[in-house]
Amino acid sequence: MTRPYIVCHMVASIDGRIDCEMVDKISGDEYYGTLEKLDCPTLLEGRVTMEHYYAKNEPFVANDPTPAGTTSVFKAADSDEYMVAVDTHGRLRWPASEIDGVPIVCIVSEQVPGEYLDMLRNEGISYICVGRDAIDLPAAMELLRNKFGVERMAVLGGGHINGGFLAAELIDEVSLLLAPGIDGRKGQTALFDGIADMDRMPVRLSLESVEQIERDMLWLRYKPLYK
């Protein structure tokens, strides 16, 4: 399979929690400085993160909920970098076709209403629609490489997006900033979360590097060992 090289880049407390407000209290700008060093022009984030920071407040509601029902790709812009949003059911509405000057690519499942894809095309927003009941992540990554030319990409969570990429064995490297703090609150999302297979064996990691950086943080880089 031809797909991008994928780095999962995250910052977490030492108990592996990633709640944004909590992490902000125990870290600074180190996350963005280390992200630049990873040389991943394209970034991918999930619906919840995009909804919180970038999308419009009101979700998309279709007049006709008939699913798109087939794989399709629409490329609105050529670029060396993209902001990729994973939005399985097509809820996100956008104030513009770019985020900070970088074109948006929405990845959705074939369950999205055809009206949602029409809206994206009319607003000049690229999309990849693939996967009958849920997004087919391996197929989406192959299309992202072959149709959009993405060679390196950073996945920036949350935990369920990271878990989905891990379960599909799509993560080539884990870049983790370990912040000097403990969350400990019940029910908080972990770095990798949401995998339903309770019999799944843990993925072993090979440590590539450790670096102590500002604010008593550690930057850990690992290679997953899927086999």
Image: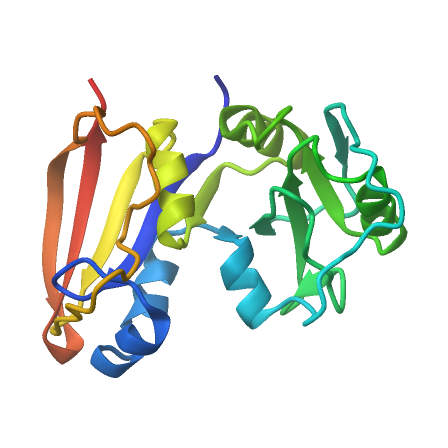
For this view, does 112 lie left or right of residue 205? Answer: right
Q: Is residue 81 visible?
A: no
Q: Residue at x 18, y 66 (%)?
A: 13
Above or below, 35 against 131 in this view is below
**Residue 98 rendering spot, x and y as whole percentages:** 70, 62
Above or below, 161 against 214 in this view is above
- Give the tally of numbered discs: 0
Above or below, 68 against 92 in this view is above
Above or below, 160 against 47 in this view is above
Q: Residue at x 28, y 79 (%)?
A: 28
Figure quadrant of residue 167: top left
Q: Residue at x 75, y 32 (%)?
A: 73
Colour pattern: rainbow
**Residue 84 rendering spot, x and y as whole percentages:** 58, 49
For this view, does 171 lie left or right of residue 45? Answer: left
Quadrant position of the C terminus in the picture: top left
Figure quadrant of residue 12: bottom left
Q: Foreground residue, 32 or 156?
A: 156
For this view, does 112 lie left or right of residue 30? Answer: right
For this view, does 139 lie left or right of residue 126? Answer: left
Q: Residue at x 73, y 63 (%)?
A: 94
**Residue 15 rendering spot, x and y as whole percentages:** 13, 60
The residue at the far bottom in this view is 25
Q: Is residue 194 visible?
A: yes
